[in-house]
Amino acid sequence: MTPTVVTGWSLAALLFAAALLAPSALRRRAHFALAAMAVAGAVTLYSHDVMALPHICAALITGGAIGLALGRGVPRSGLPALLAGLIGLAGLAALLIGGAAWRDPHAFGLLDDATDRLRADAAAAMAAAIAWGAMACAGAATILRRGSAGRGHVLTGGAMLLATGGFVWAFAATPEVGRLLACGGAALFTGRGLTKRAMDAGTGPALALIGGFSGWAVAASAFLMENMAMAVAGGLAGAAGSLFCARLCGGPGRKGLADAERHP
């Protein structure tokens, strides 16, 4: 926590706040959010011992160019599908981070110094990142397939959500690869079932739901990488997406954005 890192994270937080709260045009607020992400990414690379910095920079430039081309070229009617795909990729990134942490926990500093075993808090964060990432991936695939919901999907999603929480707890108690795989598998069914339920209210609530999944996955991944700025941003995105979905699915009798068709 050097003064440079604290200053960078503080600047990123202020830019995020300006993007959310500034009384300005949507385009300018989007520019604030873009600048905040750039600052947070730069501080992350500065504050971590990065072994393959040229590869990471090349990936950032390539991904930014692809995203810019997609954003400018996709028609407005295709934006929900584009957002679903990007959110799914964020969930996939969390899955890969969790898998990398399981494969080499020493590189992430997740081992207990006394016993040289995986710490319980690190195991919980690892399982949570994989679970939320799997939910985001499954939810994005469900939206892209435009599947219809049914009572069975809702019950399955709810049951699998409880099972996912149980597997996260079990893996934190005894880290074994079988329990980690079971956690990811249950999370896939959870994301599919809950997203199908949200799609009853429209594509918007479903996108908000999987955006919340992705945000929580990013927050859990941030604990593995000891990146507080990423944890705060992911937690805000997770909470906002989850609450926004709950508001949109609340029915037309609710205030504000509850009736998405009449109050876009």
Image: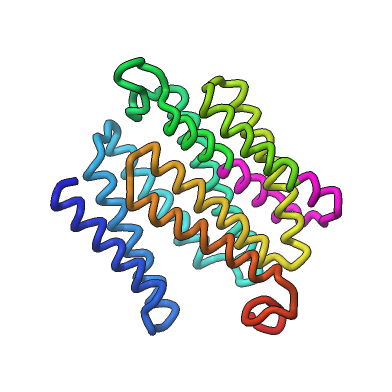
Which residue is at the far left? 3
Task: Specify the principal SS of the magenta part.
Answer: helix
Query: Magenta stretch containing residue 154, yes or no?
Result: yes
Q: Which of 147 and 260 is in front in this view?
A: 260
Quick check: 213 left or right of 7?
right
Q: Which of 64 and 243 is in front in this view?
A: 243
Residue 86, percent from left and from top:
55, 54
Quadrant of res 262: bottom right
Which residue is at the far top? 115
Q: Which residue is drawn at 26% across and 56% down?
A: 9
Residues drawn in magenta? 132-156
Q: Residue at x 85, y 54 (%)?
A: 150
Residue 189, percent from left and from top:
72, 41
Residue 37, percent from left and from top:
35, 58
Q: Which of 253 and 218 is in front in this view?
A: 253
Pick the quarter of the image with the C terminus. bottom right
Number of numbered markers? 0
Residue 177 vertical placement versus 233 (above, below): above
Residue 114, percent from left and from top:
31, 17
Residue 238 vertical placement versus 171 (above, below): below
